[in-house]
Amino acid sequence: MNAWNDLVGAALLGAQRREFDPAALPPAVAALAGQRAEPADRLLTAAAALTTYERAGRLPLSDTASAPVAAADPRPVVPAAARERLARLLAEHQPEVLEEWLRAVARAGLRVPPERVPALADAAGGRIALRAPLVEAAGPVAGWLGARNPDWAFLASPVAGDDADVWQYGSLVQRKVWFAQALVDAPDVAREALAGTWGSEPAEVRSALLELVGEHLRPSDEEFLERALDDRAQSVRHRSAELLSGMPGSALGLRMAARLRPLVSARRGTLVVTLPDEPDKAMKRDGIDAQTGAERRTTMLRRLVASTPLGFWADLGTPDDLLSWQVDGCAPSVLHESLTTAAIRQRDQEWVRTLLLRFPAEFSTAALLGALAPDALADAMTTLIKQTATANIARLVHDLPGPWSPALGTALLDWISGQLDKRFVAHAAAVVARSVPAACLTHPVVSARPADDAAPWRHTLTETLAFRRDMHAELR
C-alpha cells in the first residue's frame, strides 16, 4: 500500500519533480520498472505492473475445501413444454399465474429447473406469496441458494422441523415464518415457545403473534388469552378480547352476556335497548372501554354486542325476527353492525346467512361470505347473484376469500359469461379468470371463441383461462 501511495504522490507532483522509491516496490515490479530510462515511463510502467501484481500476482490457495452441494432431489424436472411456459411467465410478469404454476408443479411431484431458481428467487423477492410455493417446487436448491445470497435469504427460512434456535435468534420475519409453520406442524411446541418469550416481546410483536394464534385457535388457548387481557398494550388487550369473543363457551363471552342481559328486551316486535353506563374496571379489562364523547356509550354498546355469544339472542327471537324488528334506544344500524361483527367472529352460519340475505349490499358482505363454509359460500353467492345488482357482485368478486371452490368458480363463470360490457364487469372478469380453480377450466366459456368485435375483456378472459388450462395439462 505504501508503494502505491508513493506512485500516486509522484504522479500528482510530476515525475520530474518527485522520484518514487523503487525499493518499496515488490522485486518483480521494481525490476520491470527499472528497465525504463525515462522517469515518466518508469512511473507508468511501475503503476501498471503493480496493479496487475496486486490483482493476480498471488500464490494459489491451498488446503481449501469445496463448497457443499445442494442435497439431491429425486423428483423429475418439469417437461420441456412446462419449461417454455415458465420462461413466458417470468418474461410477462404474471405473478398470480406463476404462483399457481409453482403450486401445481409441487402437487404433480415435479421440480423446477435448477437454472431457473435464481430468476424465480428475484421474482419472489418482491412478492411474498411466491416464496412458500417456490421453496416447495425448487426443493433443496432453494435453501442452498438462500444460504449463500442474502437477497434470497427467505428461501432458507427455517420451519418447524428445523433448528428451533431461530425462535430465539432469528429475524422477525424468520420467527414469524417459524411460528406460523409450527402452529400447524407442532402446535404444542409453538405455544410453549410463545409463552417462554411473551414477557420480553415488544407490543407490536405480541400483537402480530396473536394474529397468527387466532388463525389456529383451540380451546386450550383460552387461559393464555385471559392472561393477555391484562397486557400493558391496548392493542394486545383488544385483540385478545376479540379472539375470546369468537371462542365458543369462553368465560369472556359469558361475562359479556351477563352484562348485556339487563340492557335488551323484546316488546311486541320491538327490541328495546338501553345504552350501558360508565364502564367499571372489569369491563375495561374485557375491552368494553371507550373514549369520552357523545358517542361513548354507543361505542360501548357496539363492543358489548359484538363480544356476546349469538346464542344469547335465542330467548328473544330468531335471527330473521330480530333483524326485522324495530329498535328503540339506539340506531338500528348500531345493533345490526355489531351483530354482523359477532357473526363474523363466531362464524355462526345461521346468523351469517340471515345477515347476507337481509343486507346483501352492505360494506360487510365480503367479510360475511368469508365466514361461511365453502359449500355454503357457493350457495350464498348464487343467491346473491339472483338478488343483487351486477355492480355489487362485481365489487364482491374482488374481496371473495380464496381458494375458491369448484362450485363457486362455476357460478361466477356462469355469471360473467352473461354480462354486458361494463368497466366494472371487465375488472371482475380479470379476477375471475385468475381465481377459478383448475377444476373449472373445462367450463364452456374457456372453449368459446369471442366474436372479433367483442370487448377486449372477453378475449382476455378466454385467453387467460385457456392459458391456465394448457399450463395444468403440461404438468400431468
Image (cartoon, rainbow, N blue to C red):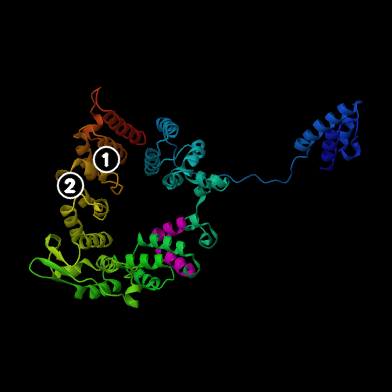
- Can I make out residue 218 in this image? no
Side (left or right) of 467 relative to 262: right
| Residue at image mark 2 | 384
Q: Is residue 192 magenta?
A: yes
Mark 2 is surrounded, within 10 Å at the Cα level, by few (under 14), some (14 to 19) or many (20 or more) other residues, namely some
Instruction: For mark 1, give the secondary structure.
Output: helix
Side (left or right) of 356 relative to 303: left
Looking at the image, the residue that sits furthest to the front is: 294
| On-image quarter of the N terminus | top right
Residue 221: quadrant of the picture: bottom left
Tell me, for residue 71, which label it has, or none: none
Residue 213 place in picture, x, y as percent:
38, 62
The secondary structure that dominates the magenta segment is helix
Looking at the image, the residue that sits furthest to the top is: 452
Seen at 90% across and 28% down, the residue is 39
Tell me, for residue 439, which label it has, or none: 1
Side (left or right) of 263 relative to 60: left
For residue 4, above or below residue 256 = above
Seen at 16% across and 57% down, the residue is 354
For residue 162, above or below residue 57 = below
- Can I make out residue 3 in this image? yes
In the image, the segment drawn in magenta is 176-197
Query: What's the amino acid at mark 1?
Result: Ala
Residue 270 place in picture, x, y as percent:
11, 66
Residue 437 place in picture, x, y as percent:
29, 42
Give the CA distance from mark 2 to mark 1: 23 Å
For residue 446, above or below residue 350 = above
Query: What's the amino acid at mark 2?
Result: Leu
